[in-house]
Amino acid sequence: MGVAGSFPGFAGKPPGPVLDREEADRALARLGAEHEAIETSLLALQDHAGRRLLEGAELTGVTRERWATTERAITLLWGYFDAYAGALAEAREIRARRRHPNREDLVALTELLCGEAITVANPGASVPPPEAGPARLSERFSLQELVARMNELYARSLDMVVASDAVWSALPARIDLLAAELHRTRSLAHSVGVRPGEHPSGDDLAEITEELTTLRVQVVSDPLAFWLPGPGSAAPGGGRPDTSRYDRAARALEDVRREIEAVLAVRQDAEARLVRLRDVLSR
């Protein structure tokens, strides 16, 4: 997506003082370590369970919008990384020419390592928004600027992926457990004649069933609608799942369960009284 920029024999004025050999070697070592760290982070993002789930999910709402943006950002990240790697490889090739680089080599290294030496194609140039004006077909960066741009895109992308994964890890399983408890409560309700349209608790159970069904569908398709970002948190994924609707359903089910258990207790007490009465009458 991006390639190292070309310079006319590297004979132009370098960006500031020309690096000496030791400075160039230190810069290359630092950039090499940075390259490895960036590659490791990008591969981890690529392999993140949340990213794989997002890629295969039928998304809706805010999650669909943000995932479309994040997918473009991840593609751009890899393009920036390729440009960064290309510039680093070119700098290493120049440095490897001679044990003691001459001035032309040092000027070229200074331009690559310190100047705006990297040209990256603009992936959005073909379809710019109407208000944006004429599209720029490419952008030029220094290595430092390119790393800053990659860090920004990476943080935003990781935040979206981690937040979605956190919601998916927390809520669907809890909803399923509550649905299982709801099924047991509904069976108990039927055993004592508590049914929708015949008893208020039966109506409540029907409403809870509908709410849990709807909630699960929405959580699976739009997890970011159930994410509360942490106040002032700059770390990717800073925040927590919004469990308020789940909590309300859980409290409502607990209330209904207690009412049904009360009905069952009354019924069992009445049956026990009838048994004792029959015993008395049979004597």
Image: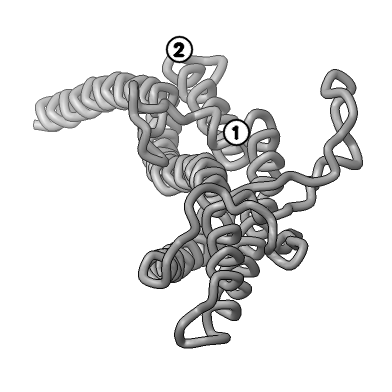
* Residue 156 location (% of width, % of height): 52, 40
Badge 2 amino acid: Pro
Nearer the observer, 178 or 265: 178
Q: Nearer the viewer, mark 2 or mark 1?
A: 1
Q: Residue at x 86, y 34 (%)?
A: 135
Q: Quadrant of the C terminus?
A: top left
* Residue 49 appears left or right of 130: left
Q: Residue at x 79, y 51 (%)?
A: 121
Q: Is residue 25 above or below residue 281?
A: below
Instruction: Tell me which residue sits at (49%, 58%) in the image.
Output: 18
Query: Can residue 162 be seen at all in this image of the molecule?
Result: yes
Residue 104: horizontal and vertical position, in percent? 61, 70
- The quadrant the N terminus occupies is bottom right
Along the line of sight, the residue nearer the viewer: 204 or 40: 40
Q: Is residue 260 left or right of residue 199?
A: left
Q: Residue at x 69, y 62 (%)?
A: 11
In the rendered image, which residue does mark 2 sit on? 200
Relative to residue 63, is residue 25 drawn left or right? left
When the figure is inspected, residue 109 is found, relative to residue 158, above or below; the finding is: below
Amino acid type, residue under disc 1 in the picture:
Gln
Element type at mark 1:
helix
N-term mark: 2 or 1: 2
Front residue of 191/46: it is 46
Q: Residues within 10 Å of mark 2 (few under 14, many from 20)?
A: some
Q: Position of residue 181 (x, y in %)?
A: 37, 40
In this view, 29 is above or below 163: below
Q: How is the image coloured?
A: one colour
Could you tell me residue 83's position as x and y percent?
Answer: 66, 61
